[in-house]
Amino acid sequence: MEVYINKISAYLPNEAIDNEYIEKILGQVSSRPSRAKRIVLKSNKIKTRYYAIDPQTRKTTHTNAQMTANAIKKLDKVNLNGLDLLVCGTTIPDQMMPNHALMVHGELKIKPLEVVSTAGICLSGVTALKYAYTSIKAKEADNAVCTGSENSSASMRSENFKQEITLRVDALEKNQEIAFEKDFLRWMLSDGAGAMHLSNTKNKDSLSLKIKSIFSRSYANELDTCMYSGCEKQEDGSIKGWREYTQNELSNKSIFSVKQDVKLLNDNIIKYTVTKPLIEMLEKKIFNPDEIDWFLPHYSSGYFRDKVYAGMKEASCDISQDKWFTNLAYKGNTGSASIYLMIEELFNSNSFNKGDNILCYIPESGRFSTAFILLEAV
């Protein structure tokens, strides 16, 4: 049983925001602009991004579920009431429960069907794709929609850090800044949603993408937590979850902000999300690097581009950069939605040709895991 991606759509909220206006929309945390912003933006090479925030009122314009539903509704000529399965992945849903996919189903108001939500960070969009793929492969469903979406801006607004700054002023000797591991990500993440329609039959009059392989690996057994929210990382590397804090501590320490151990990231991201898995994939002969026509890497920052390439070559997987495609610079880092937005842009602009082999790379630094998707245009 073959499985095909027949339709792909993307939804980006509001208008593109350039770097000059980011802090005006997210809000300034303290009495002066962030000193980290300029450094981070220079490194990540993101020029524009999208926020589900009204630039005038700074109020939320879309929930995560609404953006996801909007992406699904944009799937051209797909009968949503004919679906067998809906699978949605996201990093931070709008609420802890019910799950994200159920809220999306509620927004769509389509018929009763199997609905599944996948948890994670960037890989949640891939695991949603794999659940849909394996369900069709196993003949549990004839067709399905899977999604990846993020509404990161809701948790990056300055109001979420005001209490922490107020309480830390004396300790910081009047130097009003939030810790770099929190400030860093305010200039890295943005909002968006993508959706794919999968079927056991391919398009009759246009190209489809046949799913040849979805390979994923976790290295959480070897490394500490790197990107996290709803907890604090302790000196011994362990995690103290939000339920262990008082109500005041949750606010005073901005426990629910997204944080990144930048040193751990830089020291390990290439080895564990590029080199090690590629060596394993090539040993298993999952693909031949010489036969890849497109490489779609979801790196979080332009800073990592050449490092990813070096890690690939170390694994004897030299796919020249003239075969690479990323829209990070003008669509931002949308986490689990990023790979959907990259594939969507190429698929709907008719950039793929029959017979093209496409390799997608999706790393996740939460506790170092990674995935590669191998597609063929048919």
Image (cartoon, grey):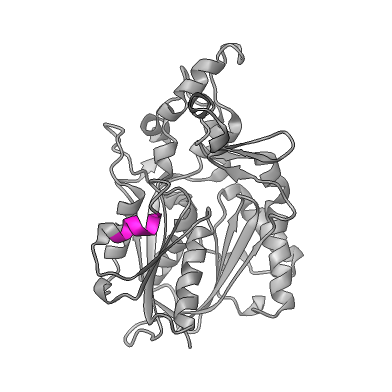
Q: Is residue 287 above or below residue 302?
A: below
Q: Is residue 127 visible?
A: yes
Where residue 374 appears, as percent x and y from the top left, is 56, 74
Indicate whether 228 appears above or below 338: above
Q: Quarter of the image containing the C terminus? A: bottom left
Q: Position of residue 289 (x, y in %)?
A: 65, 75
| Snapshot quadrant of residue 201 | bottom left
Whether residue 101 appears in magenta in the rendering, the answer is yes
Question: Quadrant of the rendered structure where residue 106 is?
Answer: bottom left
In magenta segment, residue 115: no
Residue toward you, 297 or 337: 337
x, y (%) of residue 137?
48, 82
Residue nearest the viewer, comparing 157 with 305: 157
At a point 76% along the width and 63% down the height, the residue shown is 314
Which residue is at a point 61% across and 80% down the rendered structure image?
291
Residue visible at 54% across and 59% down?
123
Lateral position of residue 252 relative to residue 50, left or right: right
Q: Decide if residue 184 is in sight here.
A: no
Give above or below for 101 relative to 248: below
User: What secondary structure prevails in the magenta region?
Assistant: helix
The picture places residue 308, in percent across and down from the top left corner, at 66, 57
| Magenta-colored span | 99-105
> Total number of numbered labels?
0
Q: Is residue 147 above or below residue 62?
A: below
